[in-house]
């Protein structure tokens, strides 16, 4: 599944930068609720991009990952003059198994499907008027088995527009 997700992501990235008229790009933010951390690097490799030249990072957020990444890219001075691609990759059908298709567990397959989306832009072309990101731990209402371990919170990477509800930094 990771190879397929990287291939689909690479294709969408190619289409997005081609639509912008760019031969390449400078920074990738790949968002996913459960794919492993190295999927951004695999996506670059599958697309024929040089991972030594293009910086990449991963956001581990479901649903709001791409919007959060967009706001963060606009707020970061180091990305202002860069060609940035945000790639949201949620191949949630990889999580299905036969137990999800019973009367007791049908909710997962009824709610979720696969989703991929790419956005190419230069942050300097936009004006960030206001930003606020509130991190509220939900206790895992919808529990996905992730293919990664969360890294420890790094306070130096937290942008000023982030606020944390009780327990949100953990």
Image: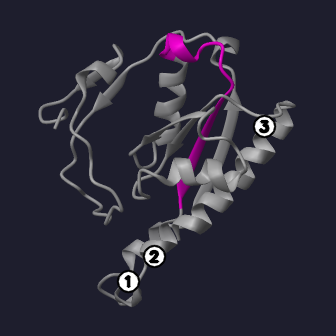
Residue indicated by mark 1: 100
Mark closest to the chain's N terminus, 2 or 1: 1
Q: Residue 104: horizontal and vertical position, in percent?
A: 29, 85
Residue 119 in percent (x, y) is at 67, 37
| 155 in relation to 87, above or below | above
Q: Earlier in the sequence, mark 1 or mark 3?
A: 3
162 relative to 81, above or below: below
Q: Quadrant of the C terminus?
A: top left
Alpha-carbon span between mark 3 and mark 2: 33 Å
In reply to whether residue 98 is colored magenta, the answer given is no
Marks 2 and 1 close (CB-CB < 8 Å)? yes
- The one nearer the camera, 83 or 162, is 83
Q: Which quadrant of the view contains residue 108?
A: bottom left
The residue most toward the front is: 52
Question: Could you tell whether 105 is left or right of 89 in the image?
Answer: left
Q: Is residue 54 above or below residue 87?
A: above
Residue at the disc numbered 2: 109
Which region is colored magenta?
75-90
Identify the residue under disc 3: 17
Q: Calculate the distance from the C-alpha at mark 1 to the C-alpha at mark 3.
A: 37 Å
Where is residue 6 drawn, in percent x and y? Answer: 60, 58
Q: Is residue 82 magenta?
A: yes
**Mark 3 secondary-structure assignment:** helix
- Residue 51 left/right relative to 48: left
Placement of 44 over or under 143, stated as above or below:
above
């Amino acid at each position: 599944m990771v190879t397929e997700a990287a291939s689909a992501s690479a294709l969408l990235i190619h289409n997005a930068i081609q639509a912008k008229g760019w031969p390449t790009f400078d920074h990738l933010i790949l968002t996913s609720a459960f794919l492993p951390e190295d999927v951004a690097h695999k996506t670059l490799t599958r697309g024929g991009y040089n991972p030594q030249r293009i910086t990449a990072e991963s956001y581990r957020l479901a649903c709001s990952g791409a919007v959060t990444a967009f706001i963060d890219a606009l707020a970061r001075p180091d990305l202002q003059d860069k060609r940035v691609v945000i790639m949201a990759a949620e191949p949630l059908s990889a999580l299905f198994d036969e137990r999800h298709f019973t009367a007791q567990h049908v909710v997962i397959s009824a709610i979720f499907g696969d989703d991929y989306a790419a956005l190419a832009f230069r942050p300097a072309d936009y004006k960030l008027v206001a930003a606020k990101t509130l991190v509220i731990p939900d206790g895992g209402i919808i529990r996905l088995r992730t293919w990664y371990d969360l890294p420890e919170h790094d306070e130096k990477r937290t942008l000023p527009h982030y606020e944390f509800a009780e327990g949100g930094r953990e």
